[in-house]
Image: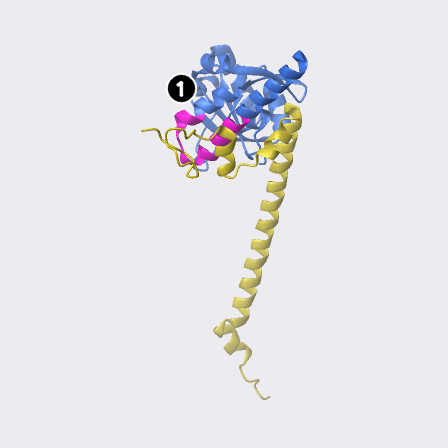
Chain colours: A blue, B yellow
Amino acid sequence: MTLNLKDLLEHLFQHDVEFVIVGGVAANALGSTLATFDLDICYARTPENLERLAAALTSLHATLRDAPAGLPFRPDAATLKAGLNFTFNTDLGPLDILGEIAGLGTYNQVAAAAEGLDLFGMPMQVLTLQGLIAAKRAAGRPKDQAQLLELEALQELRTELHNNTYSVDSA
Amino acid sequence: MKITYDPGQKNLETAQPPDALSRAEAYGVDTTLLRLALTWTPTQRLEALQSMIDLAAEAAKAQAAKAQAAKSQAAKSRARCDPRRASHDSEPERSS
């Protein structure tokens, strides 16, 4: 199933799931031009949020991605609590849910490194460029090299833009 | 000793590492596109991403259809060249 970004975000939002958008979608929201084909989120592991996330996943008919066909799996709160990071196929496309992120930590640390953005008319928490860069550096995978360089370039461009705006404003 | 990143700079003492933009450009990142993306809203950027995703899905679908057609064609050709079938086809007609 191809990712339907708007509907998937809307679905999680409507289920009141507490999460931060991370990974390629966060990078794109902040200006990256590299394509990504799944949505990565870091989720709060409170009992209430696990229940809400489980309900959202169940109604999306989430199944484990890359797992043997027919492997019994039910995305309920107990299963989510027993695990940490999961990769799913859903009715609205691939969704990866992460309980923690290398280089940043668990949801609370990730949320502290997030900024609020309006996405498709919904208030969303998105990991900042600094946060994305820290995560990419910590992952240290060769395949992330291009994205890391792009994120660092974006950070420089944003600083440049901010400084120009500031100097225009103060002129 | 100071490490230099720019082979064009001869003086190691004064050489400066390139900035993030130069590093990214050297790696093939299109910084003009990044500058353009920064003029859009986050939603517009995600809409552009969704277009890329949809295009890639269409391309994959077309590729799969093409592969399937080629497979069917190959199966037909094999059947035509099958010696058993050929000998059957060339069997002399029996005179009545």
Residue at point 41%, 39% (across, down): B7
Residue B54 screen position, x and y as percent: 63, 38
Q: Is residue A63 visible?
A: no
User: Is B19 included in the stretch rendered in magenta?
Assistant: no
Residue A17 screen position, x and y as percent: 55, 16
What amino acid type should be assigned to the residue bearing mark 1?
A: Ala
Magenta-drawn segment: A136-154
Residue B60 screen position, x and y as percent: 58, 45
Which of the image's four quarters has the C terminus of chain A? top right
Q: Is residue A157 above or below residue A171?
A: below
Q: Is mark 1 on a helix, strand or loop?
A: helix
Label 1, on which residue?
Answer: A82
Q: How many numbered marks are there?
A: 1
Residue at point 66%, 24% (across, down): B41
Of residue A107 and residue A24, the one placed in the foreground of this image is A24
Q: In which quarter of the image is residue A101?
A: top left
Of residue B49 and residue B90, the one placed in the foreground of this image is B49
Residue A115 screen position, x and y as percent: 56, 15
Which of the image's four quarters has the N terminus of chain A? top right
Q: Which chain carries label 1?
A: A
Q: Is residue A146 above or below residue A50?
A: below
Residue at point 41%, 26% (across, down): A137
